[in-house]
Amino acid sequence: KIVEKTPPGANKLIFTPWLYGERSPVDNHSIRGGLYNISLETTREHLIRAVFEGVAFNSRWICQYVEKNIKRKLNPINLIGGGANSDVWCQIYADILNRNIRQVQNPIEANARGAALIGAVGLGYTTFEQIPKFTRYKAEYTPNPENRKIYDELFQEFVIIYENNKDMYERLNKLH
């Protein structure tokens, strides 16, 4: 509820979710998370929204490399896991990734359903091509064009934060 009421961009506060290194799109075990652009105007609401947005910025960063590698745009994207229970987080993902997001029903159970469907293919009960018909969605979220400018600006800074700080993190967090 707090995130829903906080404007997109969280007053230009940026959270980097690398709490103990990162594996994708960079393999860097020394980088760490942080909050950037904190001011006296920063509120608890900004902090919470920035966390949601920071995770989505990292997904956007990964998505760029995946799409470049597979030579096609991922759209729509199915969201699973605990975060997919949040309507506002699904909308944040749609806005930051600039992709349609499909909120899978019962998203926490998606991995178990996926394993069962792979087993069903292995046993000859279905085919991989038929699997999408078994997927049910709670909702679909489309990008809000009004948020494009702020999210593009903050995403650019998100990547720059990594580039500008990776050497410092290496010095501070060398693996012994």
Image (cartoon, rainbow, N blue to C red):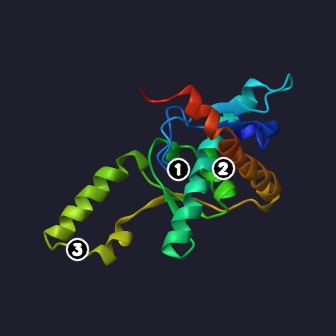
Quadrant in the picture for residue 68? bottom right
Q: Identify residue for label 1.
A: 26
* Residue 101 horizontal/vertical position (percent): 57, 60
Question: Mark 1 or 3 closer to N-term?
Answer: 1
Q: Which mark is residue 75?
A: none
Q: Identify residue for label 3.
A: 126
Secondary structure type for disc 1: loop
The residue drawn where x is 29% and y is 51% is 112
Question: Mark 3 or 2 closer to N-term?
Answer: 2
Q: Nearer the viewer, mark 1 or mark 3?
A: 1
User: How far apart in space, not on screen, are marks 2 and 1 (Cα)?
Assistant: 23 Å
Secondary structure type for disc 3: loop
- Residue type at numbered disc 1: Val
The N terminus: image quadrant: top right
Q: Which mark is residue 92?
A: 2
User: How far apart in space, not on screen, are marks 3 and 2 (Cα)?
Assistant: 35 Å
Is residue 133 visible in this depiction of the protein? yes
Is residue 1 visible in this depiction of the protein? no
- Residue type at numbered disc 2: Ile
Near-viewer residue (173 or 113)? 173
The C terminus: image quadrant: top left
Q: Residues within 10 Å of mark 2 (few under 14, many from 20)?
A: many
Secondary structure type for disc 2: helix
